[in-house]
Image (cartoon, rainbow, N blue to C red):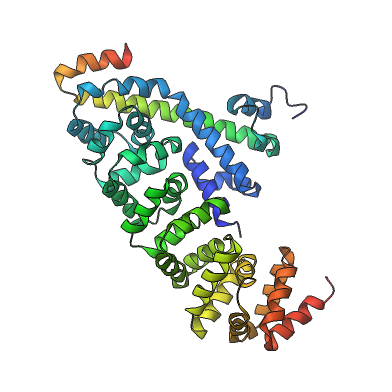
């Protein structure tokens, strides 16, 4: 499984050069930091290319009132152009950015969002009224455009992150978006900024479907030990037997055993015993797949510590598998 | 990359800058494909921007259109 964060960088790079992400699939082997550096440099080069044109467009501002700018934009300017121009114009005329955006539909703003110059997001956000940004963000949630939303979350300041939390009711949407955050340090900042109760609700929403689960495990596995342990407990405590089995099966089937182990290795013994007792681990081939994946991805030590704490028949079988010489 | 003088790796480096580590990890074929994509995107964006500006100019009030055209195109 290509991890979610790498995949998100590929999608953003594809948006930057306006191609289908499949054409960049070969680059998934690169690490996230390098992919991000590549994407940002290409984005900068392409934006800077049109800087002079945007500067000239910017000089039109005194001639054209907000209502006309908004009307002509939505009617005539494709999102690719409007998004690219918005950063430059908004930065040159911060006093008018809010006035124009207030007249645009959330739908059009969401269309333009993937094409904004990321360098301008943190500068522009403070001058734009929160309801406008939150409206566009909720539109992105409805469209499940989580990669685009993650660009805003990645570049937003603390206040905007808190505003997003208050204005976006969609737990799964916030989970999917936050899971695309590209460094553990940034993720820790975001998690710390949100009210604890909301974070718990977001984490529990991972149990509502395959994609949220994979996002949730990815997110939890990248947290520092303390929050990973606490929020991991929150997640597993909310699962009944059937849902727990589904979590184990889904994580294994989708190649997310390293993330599952990353979370499990910070759980308490009682929770691990509960997991160890899941009938899903007795499914045909399930434990073998899980162990094989863990070993193939260099997670022996984590698996051994989890197995030691789990107890029960599944743990004994896993220990036997771990003791077998490598094929 | 040695032996790539004038090739796609050097061309991509010239386009994006010499200080980008990640370029060392791209094959010549990947560098060439990426360079094509960047050039195509640049061309498409320029064309889309020009078209949008022409459209907007056409719909500006008559009084504003002349000064606006002068600002945009000199």
Left-right relation of A241 to A201: right
Q: Pick the residue in front: A312 or A198.
A: A198
Q: Is A145 situated above or below A59?
A: below
Left-right relation of A219 to A322: left
Q: Position of residue A149 (x, y in %)?
A: 41, 50
Left-right relation of A187 to A302: left
Q: Pick the residue in front: A287 or A21.
A: A287
Q: Quadrant of the C terminus of chain B?
A: top left
Residue at left offset 14%, top offset 17%:
B63
Q: Position of residue A284 (x, y in %)?
A: 65, 83
Q: Pick the residue in front: A99 or B68.
A: A99
Query: Is any atom of residue A273 visible in this view?
Result: yes
Query: Is any atom of residue B40 visible in this view?
Result: no
Q: Position of residue A212 (x, y in %)?
A: 47, 65
Q: Is A313 situated above or below A45?
A: below
Instruction: State how many labels appear.
Output: 0
Dividing the picture into quarters, in which one does residue A157 lie?
Answer: top left
Dividing the picture into quarters, in which one does residue B72 lie?
Answer: top left
Residue at left offset 35%, top offset 24%:
B50
Residue at left offset 68%, top offset 80%:
A309
Q: Is A303 situated above or below A118?
A: below
Q: Quadrant of the N terminus of chain B?
A: top right
The furthest residue to the bottom: A313
Q: Position of residue B30 (x, y in %)?
A: 64, 38
The furthest residue to the right: A325
Q: Is B68 situated above or below A172?
A: above
């Amino acid at each position: 499984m290509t991890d979610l964060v790498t995949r998100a960088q590929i999608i953003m790079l594809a948006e930057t050069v306006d191609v289908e992400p499949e054409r960049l699939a070969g680059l998934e082997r690169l690490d996230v930091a390098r992919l991000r550096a590549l994407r940002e440099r290409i984005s900068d080069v392409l934006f800077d290319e049109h800087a002079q044109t945007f500067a000239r467009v910017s000089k039109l501002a005194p001639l054209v009132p907000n209502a006309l700018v908004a009307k002509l934009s939505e009617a005539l300017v494709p999102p690719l152009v409007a998004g690219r121009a918005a950063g430059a114009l908004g930065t040159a005329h911060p006093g008018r950015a809010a006035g124009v955006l207030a007249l645009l539909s959330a739908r059009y703003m969401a269309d333009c969002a993937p094409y904004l110059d990321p360098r301008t997001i943190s500068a522009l956000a403070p001058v734009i009224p929160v309801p406008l940004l939150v409206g566009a963000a909720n539109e992105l949630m409805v469209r499940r455009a989580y990669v685009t939303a993650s660009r805003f979350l990645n570049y937003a300041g603390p206040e905007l992150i808190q505003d997003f939390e208050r204005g976006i009711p969609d737990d799964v949407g916030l989970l999917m978006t936050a899971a695309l955050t590209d460094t553990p340090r940034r993720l820790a900042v975001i998690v710390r900024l949100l009210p604890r109760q909301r974070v718990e609700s977001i984490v529990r929403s991972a149990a509502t479907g395959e994609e949220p689960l994979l996002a949730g495990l990815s997110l939890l596995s990248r947290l520092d030990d303390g929050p990973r342990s606490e929020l991991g407990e929150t997640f597993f405590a909310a699962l009944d037997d059937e849902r727990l089995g589904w979590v184990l099966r889904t994580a294994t089937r989708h190649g997310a055993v390293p993330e599952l182990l990353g979370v499990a290795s910070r759980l308490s013994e009682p929770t691990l015993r509960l997991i160890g007792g899941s009938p899903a681990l007795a499914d045909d081939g399930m434990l073998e797949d899980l162990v094989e994946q863990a070993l193939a991805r260099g997670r022996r030590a984590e698996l051994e510590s989890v197995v030691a704490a789990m107890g029960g028949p599944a743990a004994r079988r896993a220990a036997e598998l771990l003791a077998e010489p490598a094929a | 990359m040695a032996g790539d003088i004038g090739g796609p790796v050097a061309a991509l480096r010239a386009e994006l800058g010499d200080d980008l580590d990640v370029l060392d990890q791209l094959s010549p074929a990947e560098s060439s494909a990426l360079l094509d994509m960047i050039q195509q995107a640049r061309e498409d964006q320029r064309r889309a921007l020009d078209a949008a500006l022409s459209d907007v100019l056409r719909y500006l009030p008559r009084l504003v259109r002349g000064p606006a055209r002068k600002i945009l195109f000199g």
